[in-house]
Structure formats: C-alpha cells, structure tokens
Image (cartoon, grey):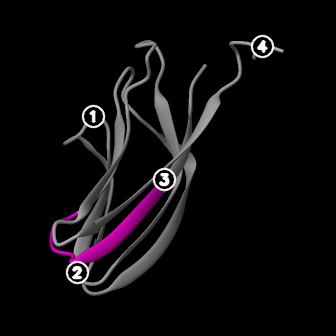
Amino acid sequence: MARPDNFATTFDATGAGTNAGVNVDKAAPADTNKRHVVTAIQCSGDSAAVVTVESPAGTVKWQKRFNGAFTMSEAFIPPIKGAVGQAVRVKISASTAACEANMQGYTTP
C-alpha cells in the first residue's frame, strides 16, 4: 500500500571521526518545498569541542560547547527546523581525535 503524502518521513544519520571532528549530514530533500526537522542528537568526544546543528551547512541553528571529554544526548522540544529545501548537519569541531554523532528527525510532508 502506498504512503499518503501527508505523512512525514523519519530519518536517522550516524557518523564517526578521528583527528578532524565529524559532520553527520542528511542530504537536502528531493522535493525542494520540504524541510528536515531535527528532533534529537547524541554525541561523544574525547576532548573539548563545539557541537552544532546547522542548516544549511554553516548556518548554526543550535550550539553547545564542551570544555573536556563529553557524552551528551539532547531532545529538541520544539524540534529544530532546517531551512526549506536544504540539508541538515550535526557537526563536532575538529579539536576531537575520536568522536561520534547521531541525529534523528523527520522530513515534512
């Protein structure tokens, strides 16, 4: 059975980095009238870093700074809306030697 167009499509994106931080991206929606919405992120790193949610890349929607090794989980209520027709990114700055990030969300119908 086909999905009705009025349902959001969920996504989960994960990435890991060594010596240069990490970018975890959800590519721009094929339909440029839609947008991605980030509902939660989980991150960890072995040293001080800045974690951001961006959309498009370089446009910071949310930011948190850590002064040392960290493990974090953040649920966004309300969720973070990405720019219409653009990718969303979770970025951990390059100061970490070993890090990982995960994001969950949905694409608007």
Q: Are marks 4 and 2 in contact (CB under 8 Å)?
A: no
In the rendered image, which residue does mark 3 sit on?
103
The numbered mark, 4 or 3, whose residue comes first in the sequence reads: 4
Q: Secondary structure at mark 2?
A: loop
Q: Tell me where the magenta segment starts and ends, as one range.
A: 93-102
In the rendered image, which residue does mark 4 sit on?
2
Amino acid on which the number 3 mark rests in the picture: Met
Of residue 19 and residue 107, the one placed in the foreground of this image is 19
Q: Is residue 96 magenta?
A: yes
Q: Secondary structure at mark 3?
A: strand
Q: Nearer the viewer, mark 3 or mark 1?
A: 3
Q: Are marks 1 and 4 in contact (CB under 8 Å)?
A: no
Give the class, few, some or many, for how many residues have Cα within 10 Å of label 4's Cα (few <14, many ≥20).
few
Q: Residue at x 44, y 23 (%)?
A: 29
Q: CA distance from mark 1 to mark 4?
A: 31 Å
Q: Secondary structure at mark 1?
A: loop
In the rendered image, which residue does mark 2 sit on?
48
The numbered mark, 1 or 2, whose residue comes first in the sequence reads: 2
Give the class, few, some or many, for how many residues have Cα within 10 Å of label 2's Cα (few <14, many ≥20).
some
In the rendered image, which residue does mark 1 sit on?
56
Q: Position of residue 41 (x, y in %)?
A: 49, 59
Query: Taking 91 as reference, is 14 left or right?
Result: right
Amino acid on which the number 2 mark rests in the picture: Ala
Q: Residue at x 43, y 79 (%)?
A: 71
Q: Nearer the viewer, mark 1 or mark 4?
A: 4
Q: Is residue 22 magenta?
A: no
Q: Position of residue 31 (x, y in %)?
A: 46, 13
Query: Taking 13 as reference, is 64 left or right?
Result: left
Amino acid on which the number 4 mark rests in the picture: Ala
Query: Taking 64 as reference, is 42 left or right?
Result: right
